[in-house]
Amino acid sequence: MRMFAYERPTSLAQAVALLDANRSDARLLAGGTDLIIGLRDGSERPHVVIDVKRVPELCTGIREDAAVVTIGAATVMAEVARSQLIRLRFPALAEAAAVVGSAQIRNRATLAGNICNASPAADTAPPLLVYGATVLAAGPGGTRRIPIAEFFVGAGVTALAPNELVVAIELPVPRGRVGAVHLRRTRRRGHDLASVTLCCGVDQSGQTRIAYGSVGPRPVLFTDDTGVLASRDSSNEAKAEILEKMFAGASPSKRSMRASPEYRLAMLRVLGSRALQTALDRLAEGRADG
Amino acid sequence: MAETLAIEFSVNGRRRTMDVPVNLTLLDLLRDTLGLTGTKLCCNVGECGACTVMVDGRAVDSCLMLAVEADGTEITTVEGLAVDGEMSPLQQAFLDKGASQCGFCTPGQLMAAQALLAENPDPSAADVQEGLSGNLCRCGCYYQITEAVLSVAEGAHR
């Protein structure tokens, strides 16, 4: 592995100053499950690696305050998947966190790292989009909030400036009941990247949100406000017409070795229909009762 | 530029203070510096689990962790399972059930299974398969490995 300087700031101000001084010559280290691979194979060649795990502002865990659940940037996937608060309020996010990588990966990889890495296949992205998450970012000018739908710009590219880092991810607690589910398709069960990763959420007002990834350069969100998808009385034809419009946002790569575009588009429709049905069932059961 | 950092941590119960290069992985520190070669170097990208160790009781791929990140932690490697030369119940179960064929993945399987049982003392077969999905066995001993883990679970003799 190439040599680099290793910095371990103990305050957010220090971390931001280090990042601002080094910008694209710096890489942030949280879980390291992507970065260490890049450092070893030479695809990442930073002058300085900034380990943010001792920044107290990022180590706040998972807490609820004033109808917002905040997940600190150093929180690992295993904590998100295990959290009673997340399982109660945002079960589809807990489901997604529980299938990222392997047990070993989930014990290191962070939720913030998953979105900052901005892989099109990031499993936590669809539920964060469906639940309307906000990214709290810090830079030299202070903090700002970025809606998650604006955060993903392209494969590996986020809305963060080179001198900004993620402090936390905020999730508004839904006012009414929501039924939601995360589903994905992989080549093998267990440790694998998704060929399609998808989340569907239906709320009491009749709004349906579907977000999906791994079928284009970035995860995307579509919302149906007509109430057709959320109604059990709608015809399958009426539902299919709306779903087709939602799935028009998919443009899978022809070059991926994981799955062909045809397979991904077919599975997107299968997972989308199944997820809608499960979300409706959960809404009816009163699960995820806010 | 040869950057090093002084770290303090424990390995299999023994406290250690040492200067480590910042670009060294925990895996390389364990194998090449400390001579603990039970932890295996295999895929080196976090796919196979052969390098699994426990950090503060949790299973991690030591190939995906810098040695400097181990500062202040307690590490357990496969060498830390046996007590006074006696195999742990899990190790004995791997032997009894034929869960080890070529043996290369065994240390990683053992550490992942040890961590799984600590968190979930009475897992189902599906829990074991899911919990060990980050550990590949090229001999295909998955059935025997699951059997071995279940045989030392709390509910094994129900």
Image (spheres, coloured by chain):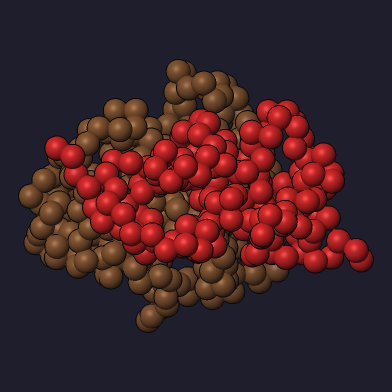
Q: Is residue A4 left or right of residue B150?
A: left
Query: Residue A10: x percent and y percent?
Result: 21, 66
Query: Residue A54: x percent and y percent?
Result: 29, 64
- Nearest the viewer among B90 and A104 is B90
Q: Residue furthest bottom?
A: A66
Locate the C terminus of chain B by quadrant.
bottom right
Locate the N terminus of chain B by quadrant.
top left
Q: Is residue A245 left or right of residue B125?
A: left
Letter of the chain in red? B
Q: Residue furthest right?
A: B158
- Nearest the viewer among B11 and A220 is B11
Q: Residue furthest top?
A: A255
Q: Is residue B39 above or below residue B43?
A: below
Q: Is residue A77 above or below residue A1?
A: below
Q: Please give the name of the residue rendered at 90% of the width and 63% of the height, measured from the top-left corner.
A: B157
Residue A16, by quadrant, is: bottom left
Q: Is residue B130 left or right of residue A43?
A: right
Query: Residue A205: x percent and y percent?
Result: 53, 67
Query: Residue B41: x percent and y percent?
Result: 50, 34
Q: Colour of chain A?
A: brown
The reply to whether residue A97 is visible in this rendering is no
- Nearest the viewer among A102 and A63 is A102
The reply to whether residue B76 is visible in this rendering is yes
Q: Please give the name of the residue rendered at 19% of the width and 44% of the height, measured from the top-left corner.
A: B3
